[in-house]
Image: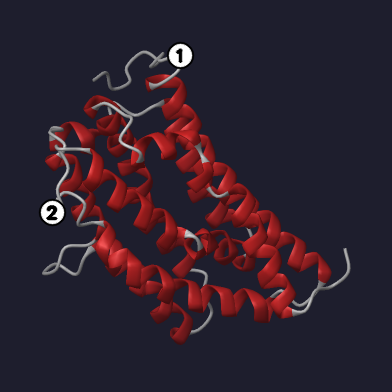
């Protein structure tokens, strides 16, 4: 491929999201459309917890590789967003409030005993990708957050409208992400557009975003197979 201008690169990144982001997945449509049972929603929240809880590990490995205090400070903010600061709860604690609100035992959720194997494989692959790939690719893989405000809006409004066991307090995880995600994207996108200055590097960042979209899609594939159709959770996995 020939080298793209920075704006054309951004257009190419956004096109990947338009095609591959998991807002298009059938399981997401069932979730926000009110077509899942409470047990199926519990399975989604329990499995998604592992992804949420692994984000700080992924980000910590990235911070360790950043070369300047300015870059480290910028990315360290993401750790606080998810881990909290010891006074204000972070995203992990808010996600556990979601699983609490859905009636799941917190100790069971945190134990990860009920995870689908595919969830574990997918999330571990993401942490390993960020740890092992170039800094540019690692940062580019975070750019699925360009598309997250739309999926959050659909998810929150749809779940509040369609499930009597869901409340605004249950879904409190998502409200801060509507402002945190655009802030995260502004930095990461600017970094990628500035540093992807060859055709080879541009292809690497596009491939990194495809990988991340595929990883999120695969998690919903596993949930759909185990809990919707054909409905075959593997041995040891959560059973509603």
Q: Which residue is mark 2?
A: 169
Crowd around label 2: few <14 · some 14–19 · many ≥20 (10 Å): few
Residue 112 seen in the figure: no
Placement of the N terminus among the 4 image quadrants: bottom right
Helix, strand or loop at label 1? It is loop
Residue 48: name its quadrant.
Answer: top left
Crowd around label 1: few <14 · some 14–19 · many ≥20 (10 Å): few
Q: As rendered, which of 159 and 192 lies closer to the eye? A: 159
Q: Residue at x 63, y 74 (%)?
A: 192
Helix, strand or loop at label 2? It is loop
> Mark 2 vs mark 1: which is more N-terminal?
2
Residue 223 seen in the figure: yes
Picture coordinates of residue 238, whole percent (x, y): 28, 22
What's the mark number on residue 66? none
Picture coordinates of residue 223, whole percent (x, y): 42, 28
Does residue 182 appear left or right of residue 77 in this picture? right
- In this rendering, is residue 158 above or below 222? below
Cα–Cα span, label 2 and label 1: 32 Å
- In this rendering, is residue 231 above or below 76? above
Q: Which residue is mark 1?
A: 230
Q: As rendered, which of 116 and 59 lies closer to the eye? A: 116
Q: As rendered, which of 150 and 63 lies closer to the eye? A: 150
Picture coordinates of residue 155, whole percent (x, y): 34, 49
């Amino acid at each position: 491929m020939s080298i793209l201008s920075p704006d054309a690169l951004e257009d190419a990144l956004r096109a990947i999201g338009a095609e591959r982001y998991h807002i298009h997945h059938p399981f997401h449509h069932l979730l926000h459309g009110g077509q899942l049972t409470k047990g199926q929603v519990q399975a989604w929240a329990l499995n998604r917890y592992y992804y949420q809880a692994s984000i700080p590990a992924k980000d910590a490995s990235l911070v360790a590789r950043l070369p300047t205090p300015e870059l480290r400070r910028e990315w360290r903010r993401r750790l606080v967003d998810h881990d909290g600061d010891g006074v204000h709860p972070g995203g992990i604690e808010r996600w556990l409030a979601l699983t609490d609100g859905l009636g799941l035992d917190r100790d069971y959720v945190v134990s990860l005993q009920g995870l689908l194997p595919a969830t574990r494989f997918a999330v571990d692959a993401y942490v390993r990708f960020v740890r092992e790939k170039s800094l540019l690719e690692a940062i580019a893989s975070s750019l699925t957050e360009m598309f997250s405000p739309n999926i959050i809006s659909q998810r929150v409004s749809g779940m509040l409208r369609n499930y009597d066991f869901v409340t605004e307090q249950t879904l409190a995880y998502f409200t801060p992400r509507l402002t945190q995600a655009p802030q995260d994207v502004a930095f990461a996108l600017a970094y990628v557009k500035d540093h992807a200055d060859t055709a080879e590097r541009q292809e690497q960042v596009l491939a990194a975003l495809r990988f991340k979209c595929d990883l999120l899609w695969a998690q919903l594939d596993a949930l759909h197979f185990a809990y919707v159709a054909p409905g075959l959770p593997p041995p040891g996995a959560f059973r509603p």
